[in-house]
Image (cartoon, rainbow, N blue to C red):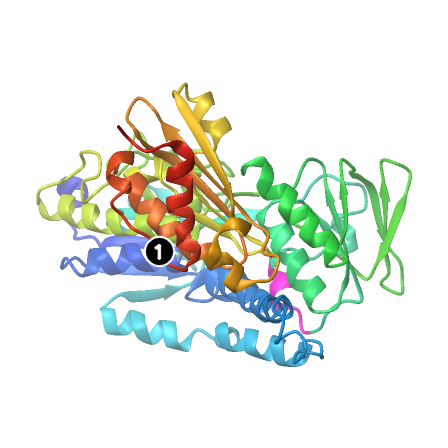
Amino acid sequence: MAGAFEGSAPDYDLIVIGAGPVGENVADYAAKRGIRVAIVESELVGGECSYWACMPSKALLRSGHVLRAAQRLDGTRQAVTGELDVPAVLARRNTFTSEWKDDGQVDWLNSAGIDLIRGHARLTVPRTLDVNGRAYTARAVAVATGSVPVLPDIPGLAVANPWGTREATSASAAPARLLVLGGGVAGTELATAWASLGSDVTLLSRGPLLEREEPFAGELVTKALREMGVDVRIGVSPTGVHRDEAGVVTTTLDDGSTVVTDEILVSTGRRPNTLDLGVDTVGFIPGEKLSVDDTMLVTGTDWLYAVGDVNGRALLTHQGKYQARAAGEVIAARLSGGDVHDAPWGGHVATADHAAVPHVIFTDPEVAGVGLTEAQARARGLNVTTVEYDLGWVAGAKLHADGYEGHAKLVIDEDRHVIAGATFVGQDVADLLHSATIAIVGEVPIDRLWHAVPSYPTISEVWLRLLETYGRPN
């Protein structure tokens, strides 16, 4: 790479396109190794997660979770007699987005010695990009532009001004009636949030809710949403959408029925954000993911990296930041002629993307999973055994809620005698997940897990109950 700019020095060692959490981490970890870094951002520094996704959505959800948790306990349910203060919840949400201002994030970039270039970047030739009509060159370029929603081809939908996840997480008031299209993570979370805030919510899903999870996860979430008053309709699809002059939305379904609402939210999937980046000028297809190796180097190049959602490996902020830490370090190492540690589980690779991706769906109940589901494990040809346990039978869980409802499952790889996957569904299970993640990443043998004693009485006692169900080693 050093010889690519004979006769003139590049503007930077590394330019990162996209200043969300992923891009910030690529830039930070590279800059800490002493290379010159710039980051390009066309919107707010901090990206989708900070302003329109992870943080505002979880802020919208939290108040409802706390209220229902109090209502599940005798003694507190009698004390909690009111409803959520919606303006107060929305105002609290705004604090998590810094009122959609990025001053603090810009200050951080300055303190880290990373140059900020405002504008839309497009690749023009290898190692060169255009921002606002000016060319910038770098020895390496990292694309961290995330993903964008996909609008399904439904007659009338596009002109009906539907909400995307951005509008749903930044709305200034709760719509009286809301239709949610999509039974995945965003759809179920936002249906939960707006139902908590008083909206009359209808949720449409072609297949079972959360169908990429273990089946019991979607079943428990469906039950809970219906108990909250959400009209969950499974196996139906819209055939047309119309918004009238008064703003009322009428959605016609393939079963002949109609749903009349004030807003319609589309959360039916996302695609890599590569459509207007100029990737075609360097041999790639706009709108498609940029395939990478485990160091995030784009296949067929020695200068281009793709990190986070844009590479399609794991569309999760924390997993993108994990990739970014590896990418920032390895870019710096390669540019400076240092050692590269790219063996599995080395410091310059994102090995966990393949088998140990943790994720939490903040519905109520929460869904927390890591590794492979049983179906995924069997599809890979693994020799697996599964064990399950009702979380309502765990003493520590009963302390969290009267009549606690939840479920846990382990997928065990019998050939290696380690856990290949774990799923927990229930109130307050999110923090169970890291122990399962460590067990999978560390390939802790089942026999050794018997010596990891869970504290009593906590929900973590489910680990002992799962091991007992599996059977004590000889």
| Residue 105 falls left or right of residue 86 | left
Q: Position of residue 27 (x, y in %)?
A: 27, 58
20 or 133, nearer to the observer:
20
Q: Position of residue 178 (x, y in %)?
A: 77, 59
Q: Which residue is found at the position 64% from the left and 51% from the top?
A: 188
SS majority, magenta: helix
Q: Which residue is found at the position 29% from the left and 50% from the top?
A: 453
Q: Position of residue 84 (x, y in %)?
A: 67, 76
Q: Position of residue 106 (x, y in %)?
A: 36, 73
404 or 141, nearer to the observer:
404
Quadrant where the N terminus lies? top left
Residue 382 in the image: above or below residue 399: above
In terms of image quadrants, where is residue 87?
bottom right
Quadrant where the C terminus lies? top left
Q: Which residue is found at the position 19% from the left and 45% from the top?
A: 330
119 or 291, nearer to the observer:
291
Q: Residues within 10 Å of mark 1 (few under 14, many from 20)?
A: many
Q: Is residue 282 magenta?
A: no
Dot 1: element = helix
Give the residues drawn in magenta, as a range. Answer: 166-172
Q: Amino acid at mark 1?
A: Gly
186 or 301, nearer to the observer:
186
Is residue 296 in view from this perspective?
no
The residue that label 1 is drawn on is 23
| Residue 421 falls left or right of residue 287 | left
Residue 254 in the image: above or below residue 224: above
| Residue 43 falls left or right of residue 294 | right
| Residue 469 falls left or right of residue 227 | left
